[in-house]
Image: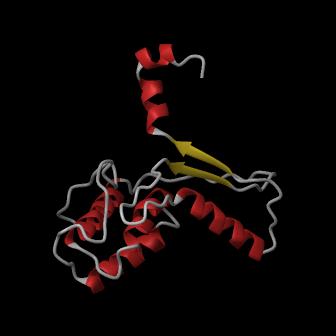
Amino acid sequence: MDAYKPINNHLTVRKRLSKSDGSTNAYGYIYKSMIGSLLFLSAIIPDIMYATSLLSRFMQTPSLLHFKVANRILRYIKGTVEVGLKYRKRDTGELQGFSDSDWAGLVDDSKSTATNHVHWLRKILLDVGFIQKKGTVLHVDNQFAVSIAKNPIHHGRTKHI
């Protein structure tokens, strides 16, 4: 990876991944090793979690396209080594979720992963004895909301929202 140039984003916006994308099969052992390492890193670098979990769906028969996307994530990590998160303790202890809005982002089964992760985390918290009494707030980064915020013309038309 030393020869690769770092990049600013880990997943292309318009690219949809599928089990049968038409490209040739990649080396399964190397791909599985990469995805396992990325899953481990996603605990430290949470912004790669969605892309890594998306790629983990193709571990049975990875293609060269899936392999290229995994390499793209590694290039992203190379370019963002100095970026980190600061976690602060809060008194409430309630679970909150943050997600990009990629509803039905997977072509094969048209499922979204945002609420699935929240449901899974609530089960883990319940297993360790932490009961969530209220519903989980899910903050979604929506492309429409971002375009309204950036474009003053749209902002004028949507002040009532």
- Front-most of residues 114 and 108: 108
Which quadrant holds the C terminus?
top right
Residue at x 47% of width, y 51% of height = 103
- Front-most of residues 156 and 84: 156
Residue at x 33% of width, y 54% of height = 11
Residue 8 at x, y = what percent?
Answer: 32, 48
Residue at x 21% of width, y 65% of height = 2
Residue 1 visible, this orientation: no
Above or below, 24 relative to 51 = below
Residue 128 at x, y = what percent?
Answer: 76, 75
- Relative placement, left or right, of 70 versus 82 is left
- Relative placement, left or right, of 4 versus 154 is left
Residue at x 30% of width, y 48% of height = 14
Above or below, 138 relative to 132 = above
Residue 26 at x, y = what percent?
Answer: 21, 78
* Extreme residue toward the front, this view: 109
Which quadrant holds the N terminus?
bottom left
Above or below, 142 relative to 160 = below
Total number of numbered discs in the rendering: 0
Residue 18 visible, this orientation: yes
The quarter holding residue 27 reads bottom left
